Image: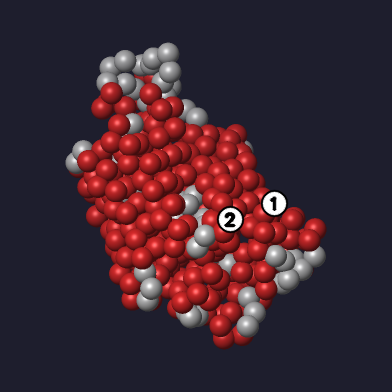
Amino acid sequence: MKSGQKIFYGWWIVVGSCFLNFAGIGIIMNTMGVFIKPVAESLGFTRGGFTLYFTIAALAMMVMAPVMGKLLERYNIRLIMTICTTMMAASFALFSQCRTLTQFYIVAVFLGIGSAGSHIIPVSLMITNWFIDKRGLAMGIVFAATGVGGLIFNPLANWIIMNYSWQATYLTFGLIIGIFSIPTAMFIVRAKPADKKLLPLGGEAALAKQSELEQGGLKATQAFRTGAFWLLALIILLIAVANMGVLHHIVPYLTDMGFSTTTATALMSLHMAMLVFGKVLAGGLADRLGLLKSYLLLMGGLMVSIALLYGSQLMWVATIFSVLFGFSIAVRTVLPPLMTARVLGQKHFAVIYGFLNIFTTLGTAVGVPLSGFIYDATKSYYLAFALYILLCLIAAGAGIAVMIKSAGNKQK
């Protein structure tokens, strides 16, 4: 096996993974808040009822996550991902033709199925396989692309909606998703270095370290019986609920507070810009400070940022919120796959993380409409924000427990 080239192919995997996250998360997940008011008001939906389509997409993704983990591990990753990225792009474009909630819900099922094999699971699998050295940095870079997508497409979505229609926005974005994701799946992605007759980054020493991690790792059936797996699941679930419950309601919340849609989307773009910086920094911090310290730092920032929303009728407070929330929310995407590999090993990483991703999508399914329904019932988001701070506090405690327990097991 070759240990390297002028440009290590793993960095091309990073580029391709950036494209996948840029389209699949940066557009589909990170721009949803811009659509809530225009679509709900245009078609006469409640906010809770409309955002429920995102829940259905997340549930479909949740059901498919473990299945997709097995498919990606056993079959040609390019074939599986080409099918999934095509389904994902086509489904998002089809939202432009929906006029009833039922239609949104049906299309959302196909969006969720396609998404399951297009970004989080395959990207985490590839980065884990291709990188031993600089894994945290690589993971941070590829998930930073989600922030780049949000930074670019939130104001673009607002502009297209204001000048054309929300239907034109869905159609345009569906085409863009396809342009970035389908060719990447067809021509760039490779599941592991052996597919290119290469070693993971770091050469022979990295390969030996990876072999040790795989041998010491748990089989999927063993992992499911450990307390560590369920603590990781709890962490992933609670952070996803809090993140998505806040993220997709930032624009409607700020406009409710008196900001114009242009200002609200500008603040959302600031959040996305900080998300880019935060994810790259989070990966580097994980390599240098260790996973536990990095995790607690980001969780503390997340709780403080949500608390700032109570005073965000002031522009300077809203700005600080956007900066801090954007930086801290890297804890949702960058650290969980690193923590999974550390705590449960890499023997069956794709399958194990596929199951853990159920809780990511379940949290997404709960958080987005939960904020909408709380708003519908109370005409305020304040109760939702208090709930999310509490969930983050519980997740921080669970993170301490799982990482300390893991360190203790390794010392025995």
Return the x and y of residue 362 as percentages of the image width and height.
Answer: 41, 65
Residue topped by disc 2: 159
Return the x and y of residue 101 as percentages of the image width and height.
Answer: 38, 76
Q: Nearer the viewer, residue 211 or 7?
A: 7
Q: Residue at x 43, y 39 (%)?
A: 19
- The amino acid at mark 2 is Trp
Q: Residue furthest bottom?
A: 377
Q: Nearer the viewer, residue 218 or 257?
A: 257
Q: Secondary structure at mark 2?
A: helix
Q: Secondary structure at mark 1?
A: helix
Q: Residue at x 47, y 28 (%)?
A: 133
Image mark for residue 331: none
Asked if the residue under mark 1 is in contact with the one under mark 2, i.e. CB atoms within 8 Å, the reply is no
Q: CA distance from mark 2 to mark 1?
A: 23 Å
Placement of 277 over or under 88, stated as above or below: above
Return the x and y of residue 321 as percentages of the image width and height.
Answer: 71, 58
Quick check: can you spot residue 382? Answer: yes
Q: Nearer the viewer, residue 316 or 264?
A: 264
Residue topped by disc 1: 323
Q: Residue furthest front?
A: 164
Placement of 122 over or under 210, stated as above or below: below
Q: Nearer the viewer, residue 233 or 380?
A: 380
Quick check: can you spot residue 73? Answer: no
User: In which image quadrant can residue 267 be found?
Assistant: bottom right
Q: Residue at x 31, y 21 (%)?
A: 198
- The amino acid at mark 1 is Val
Q: Nearer the viewer, mark 2 or mark 1?
A: 2
User: In which image quadrant can residue 259 be found?
Assistant: bottom right
284 sits to left or right of 69: right
Placement of 295 over or under 170, stated as above or below: above
User: In which image quadrant can residue 112 be found?
Assistant: bottom left
User: Quick one: quadrant of the N terminus?
Assistant: top left
